[in-house]
Image (cartoon, rainbow, N blue to C red):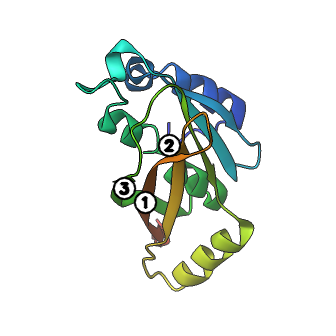
């Protein structure tokens, strides 16, 4: 999928058909046309609850996994390498019912990445997102570190 530039709508539909998301009850609600924002929800179900009857932590983590990398990748374009490098999760409250996360990047963050990588250096920006319950309380905070580098020019043949 990396070599195909998809619009936000078709990408959202494809992600909602991805078996790991289906199994975990994860649904991509929206990806903005400019790829600066994405919203995801996860309903509580038999396949994503833990022994204590709350959301399985791995599912909470999975619902946040690809989005910052996707948003940055689609904004920077094919001249850049973008990978998830590290993640951490801080569980705050037991997750029950439907939980949501909204991922946002700004034009200023993108410009900072471009400036930091302009000379060919790697850059490792960090982003954070809160997973919220139906009351708006923070269930978990996820921190994501990306690896970003401008691809070297291809040699002339």
Disc 3 residue crowd, few under 14, some 14–19, many 20+, Cα 10 Å: few
- State which quadrant residue 101 falls in: top right
Q: Position of residue 99 (x, y in %)?
A: 53, 34
Residue 8 percent location from the top left of the image: 69, 37
- Please say whether residue 89 is visible from this viewpoint: yes
Viewer-side residue, 8 vs 62: 62
Instruction: Provide the residue designation for mark 3.
Output: 90
Q: Is residue 157 left or right of residue 71?
A: left
Any mark on residue 69, and which?
A: none
State how far apart marks 2 and 3 are (Cα): 30 Å
Reading the chain from its start, which is encountered first: label 2 or label 3? 2
First in sequence: mark 1 vs mark 2 = 2
Can the viewer see residue 7? no
Instruction: Kindly identify which numbered label has been placed on residue 144.
Output: 1
Q: Residue at x 43, y 35 (%)?
A: 95
Residue 103 sits above or below residue 96 on the image: below
Residue marked by disc 2: 2
Looking at the rendered image, the disc whose residue lies closer to the viewer, 1 or 3, is: 3
- From the viewer's perspective, is residue 77 above or below residue 115? above
Taking the spot 54% from the left edge, 83% from the top edge, the residue there is 116
| Disc nearer the start of the sequence (1/3) | 3
């Amino acid at each position: 999928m990396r070599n195909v530039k998809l619009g936000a709508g078709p990408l959202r539909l494809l992600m909602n058909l991805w078996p790991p998301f289906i199994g975990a009850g994860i649904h991509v609600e929206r990806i903005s046309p400019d790829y600066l924002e994405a919203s995801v929800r996860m309903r509580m179900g038999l396949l994503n609850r833990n022994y204590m009857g709350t959301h399985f932590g791995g599912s909470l983590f999975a619902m946040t996994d690809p989005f910052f990398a996707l948003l940055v990748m689609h904004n920077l374009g094919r001249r850049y390498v973008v990978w998830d490098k590290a993640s951490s999760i801080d569980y705050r409250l037991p997750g029950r019912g439907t939980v949501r996360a909204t991922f946002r990047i700004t034009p200023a963050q993108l410009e900072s990445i471009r400036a930091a990588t302009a000379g060919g250096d790697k850059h490792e920006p960090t982003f954070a997102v809160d997973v919220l319950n139906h009351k708006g309380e923070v269930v978990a905070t996820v921190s994501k570190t990306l690896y970003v580098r401008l691809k070297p020019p291809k040699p002339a043949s």
